[in-house]
Image (cartoon, helix red, strand yellow):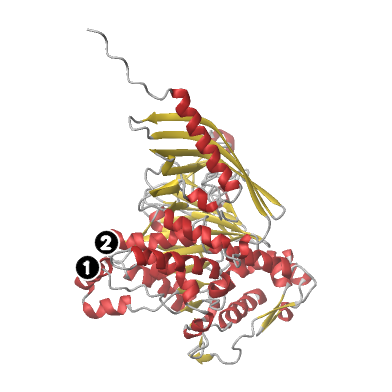
Amino acid sequence: MAKKAPVRKANGRDVHYEVEQFLYRQAELLDTKHWQDWIELFTPDGVYWMPPEPSYKTWDGQPAIFAEDKNLMTVRMKRVLHPDAWSQRPLWETNHVVSNVVVEKVAPNGDVQVRSRFHMMELRRDDVRHFAGSYRHELKKTKDGYRIKLQRVDMTNAQAAYDYVLQMWV
Amino acid sequence: MLQEQIPDLAKYVEPDRVRREVYTDPEIYGLEMQRIHERVWIYCGHESQVPKAGDYYTVQIGRQPMLMVRGADGKIHVLYNRCPHRGNMMCGDRKGNAGDFFRCSYHAWTFQHDGRLRSIPMMESGYSGTRYGKDNPDCSMKRAARVENYRGFVFTSLAKDGPTLAEFLGASRVAFDDMCDRAPEGEVEIVPNCFRVIQHSNWKIFLENQLDALHPSVTHQSTGRAAHEVEKMIAAKAKKGEAPLSYHMLSAFATVTIDKWDAFQTLNYPHGHCILTGYMGLRPQDPDTLAYDKIMIKKYGQQRFEEIVGVNIHHVLIYPGLSVQSPLQQLRAVRPLGVDRTLTEIWHFRLKGAPEAIYRRSLAYYNLVNSPATLVNADDLENFWKCHQGLSSDGGDWVTFGRHLGRDIEKNGVMETAPNCGTSEAPMRNQMKAWAEYMRG
């Protein structure tokens, strides 16, 4: 009996390329301040999470620097777009570089778990700050492309005192 | 000698205005560290931060790097973080466990948890016949002059003399009573995370903002409006027609309009302590609250329960270093780092014996308002920075606190704001009065 032909899967390189493009697009939306488009990258129950330290296993019921569903993301977006968000009035720009992309898991349904590293430079008035760390995305494969179920952001400087605060997603 | 350089501090403070140098002059800052922060009772931390013997936390008191440590006998000690030998800092980490004793990383002198010298390598051969050894107190780690604990909250004073902690706190101790009494077990425990945020402004600017009832609807309107829009959107979609309470906590900044804040009241006490009354509607009739009420009534009885949850406090300011939101079980400790740099250490506490949902409710506030990605304080910090910049200019000499001046009502040494004068600048006047008293020495 002839061997059954193997099911044709997206080859590893294609997944890697698609995931990378997705991560770059997410970073670009932040840097170009397309907040609504950025929020739309999440699934309806998606969560953006920045734990206070690397040992945390879940965002639920714990202290968190960010732990936002789409509703809270919308509050944050509307706040910075309000003309009287005083702290947002000065010149404020960011630049993200995302790299070291490692696809950790690809599920049979196409969902992906991917980790990467980022470096973000922020300019506010005349001050430059640097933040760096790692992302872990749990991506759901949909007909419109990937959507984020959970994005975990571990800041390398999470435990250091924050000089001023973070106003937007990193 | 600073006193000679600043001969007449009285001229810097009038009952309703303060010279700008009080916020910007590094010499005045040095003097206030010496006369205020390194003398009065300053909050170190909560005893549940150091549960096991040898557990320590470092803490800055005025300009002094200190250690709060749990001894083998269970007692909490506060020590200068310094080896008496060559001055090396003993603990370089922010927190940790010292083991059975402290050991200096430079020459291995060791010390008990209470600071007493334990051993020196080759002590007999190296030091016999000298003045150095266990009998000489100068060979031990220096202890804080006084340490006291009120309901688990540990304070230290670096001065031998002065009022006791109870005398110092006076009525402001309600901050801790209100927190602990709301716990079915009568005490709180720390949630083991500290948010630390640095403000680019003088420490007094932060404290003066804490009970400033005029600022929320101005400073925080962007967040209030944004949250209110989303709150309405969620309510329209939800079956029960209500958004989570956390949205209300944020939208209140817009829905409680500027005129409504006059309905609040401030109570102003000796030593600069102040209370802002008002509760932001945190006693709703939802199932979580009702379940909590039931546990509390069983524990305390109906009458005592009503007393406990009826305490009407929004904020307690314990001058010069602590801002407490007791109904939400969180506090911000103020650590001045320099004349224009101030660290806030922000902690949340769990009511022992209360249902998980009650913890989560105040946790939401901790995360949304007090985290380094705060939806609220970002605009405060922007204003603080702008204040400090303005005060550094020659555009004017004074900061004024004239709102509702002369309308405060004195009752047994407490200045109460008159009815419908909640936005009074009485708390700032009260803080500067205490400041001037301390600075006169």
- Measured in 3D between alpha carbons, the distance from the residue under mark 2 to the one under mark 1, in whole angstroms, is 9 Å
How many neighbours does mark 2 have within 10 angstroms: few (below 14), some (14-19), or many (20 or more)? some
Give how far across and how far down residue A135 sits, in percent. Answer: 49, 39
Q: Residue at x 59, y 82 (%)?
A: B425
Disc 2 element: loop
Residues under numbered marks 2 and 1 in contact, where contact means CB atoms less than 8 Å apart: yes
Give the residue at the far right of this rendering: B394
Amino acid type, callout 2: Pro
The subunit letter for the residue under badge 1 reads B
Q: In screen coordinates, is A19 left or right of B15?
A: left
Quarter placement of the N terminus of chain B: bottom right
Q: In screen coordinates, is B375 left or right of B191?
A: right
- The answer to whether residue B387 is seen in the rendering is yes
- The answer to whether residue B146 is seen in the rendering is no
* Residue nearest the viewer, comparing B296 with B288: B288
Name the quadrant containing residue B4. Answer: bottom right
The subunit letter for the residue under badge 2 reads B
Give how far across and how far down residue A156 sits, in percent. Answer: 53, 41
Image disc number at residue B295: 1
Amino acid type, callout 1: Ile
Task: Identify the residue position indicated by label 2 in the image.
Answer: B355
Circle nearer the N terminus (2, 1): 1
Q: In screen coordinates, is A154 left or right of A7?
A: right
In the figure, B283 relative to A29: above or below?
A: below
* Residue nearest the viewer, comparing A18 with B305: A18
Give the residue at the far top of this rendering: A1
Q: In screen coordinates, is B118 left or right of B4?
A: left
Disc 1 element: helix
Give how far across and how far down residue A89 sits, in percent. Answer: 65, 62
Give how far across and how far down residue B42 sits, in percent. Answer: 52, 65
Q: Do labels 2 and 1 share a chain?
A: yes
How many neighbours does mark 1 have within 10 angstroms: few (below 14), some (14-19), or many (20 or more)? some
